[in-house]
Amino acid sequence: MDSIVVTGNGPLQGEIPVAGAKNACLALMPATLLSDAPLTLTNAPRLSDIRTMTALLESLGAEVAALQGGQVLALSSHALDSQRADYDIVRKMRASILVLGPLLARYGHAEVSLPGGCAIGARPVDLHLRALEAMGAEMDLRDGYVHARAPGGLRGAIFEFPLVSVGATENVLMAATLARGTTVLKNAAREPEIVDLAQCLRRMGAQIEGEGTSTITIDGVDTLGGATHPVVADRIELGTFMLAPAIAGGSVECLGGRMDLVQSFADKLAETGVEVVQTERGLRVTRTGDRVRAANVVTEPFPGFPTDLQAQFMALMCTADGTAVLEERIFENRFMHAPELTRMGARIEVHGGTAKVTGVARLRGAPVMATDLRASVSLILAGLAAEGETVLSRVYHLDRGYERIEEKLRGCGARIERVKG
Ligand code: EPZ
């Protein structure tokens, strides 16, 4: 298995291009299931999760062509011949549940394997099912599968999510585009990925209002058409690369970065003493001082501080001046990076959903590994500021969400290499 070797090497200088958002693309791809006409996604990221979604859609009979090296995805569902998402694929990626809403809306039935728990928490899908039930679907959970039926077709409904869920909002948003009548989703997720999905669905002919706020209203239409849609920039990849100069020092321009995608995170960086400026081409991040200041973080749904940047921010806090308290409120088990960072010399105490990080002057390289994507990348970031070599194994987690990360960081002067194993 491959590993990545990072050697702390002082300040970074240069630019890093930000790719299209993995989590937006994973929701946009299933939108093809809503229509006979072609859907073309541009600015798609080249990641293993995207290949997993491709395999899932192909298993349903959809056609997915990766063009221009994978940056353009040409999707078509004109010859769909299955409405069953098998365990074999769903177990690899929880976002597979996003085919449920579209299949049910278009065909009146679907069978989707229930995704299990995962490293960061139990992650149930009850809200996806309850919202679709409110729209007239009948759900039967048997043999590890959701057997969903809507014999008379889905109908519009008013549904208030008891807690904010990105995936459930996406699933129901897609389903509602083809339901009879009007659907009102209250306490909906406001993430940029939801806005991107709504914009794409509107290009396909859907009637949607209110995306980006907590109330989304969808007027169902009879059919949807084709569209070409550019995937929004990946705010989590952006935030991750913004942390590289914050941790290692120096100045990096993240090309394609937009402040509105990462405002709360950028505000937090500013609190630590790191400068973030919007330029014509993206966001420039500069750390001039020797050490950043400690800052506390509470993860929240958008527009709050994203859980998907908590691990990376913890890596920054490991060498900050002072003590930071990081509270994880979205997932119950998202501190797996803490013991690995500790192996690099960090001082971290975890109590339930709270981590107390007391900065040290210097981290030391070590062999490390992680069991999820963001934890993995936090160890690479920590390696940029560590003395000596950090060797990250289980790199396949990283490849789920970061495209050419070694190349991008090397472009700014980092010493980082992939070792084939
Ligand atoms: C999305 O997951 C992202 N994944 C995650 O990114 C991200 O961490 C998360 O949103 C929160 O921002 C994709 O978009 C593919 P949720 P999702 O439903 O939709 C609970 C990454 O690193 N919940 O908003 O699965 C749930 O357990 C990943 O790229 C229920 O209780 O997240 C969690 O505690 C990891 N019942 C909270 O809600 C449900 O039916 C928020 O989850 C659904 C969710």
Image (cartoon, grey):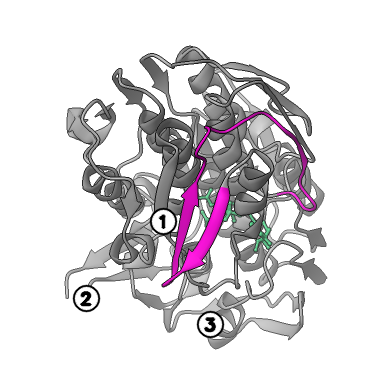
The reply to whether discs 2 and 1 touch (Cβ–Cβ < 8 Å) is no
Residue 139 drawn in magenta: yes
Q: What residue did someone put label 2 on?
A: 1
Q: CA distance from mark 2 to mark 1?
A: 31 Å
Question: Who comes first in sequence, dot 3 or dot 1?
Answer: 1
Q: CA distance from mark 3 to mark 1?
A: 35 Å
> Which quarter is ligand 1 in?
bottom right
Q: What residue did someone put label 3 on?
A: 340
The region drawn magenta spans 138-164
| Rendering coords of residue 169 (x, y %) | 64, 41
Q: Say the numbered circle drawn on residue 112.
A: 1
State which quadrant residue 259 falls in: top right
What residue is shown at x 20% (from left), y 30% (from top)?
Answer: 79
Q: Label 1 is placed on what type of residue?
A: Val
Q: Residues within 10 Å of mark 3 (few under 14, many from 20)?
A: many
Q: Secondary structure at mark 3?
A: helix
| Rendering coords of residue 303 (x, y %) | 75, 40
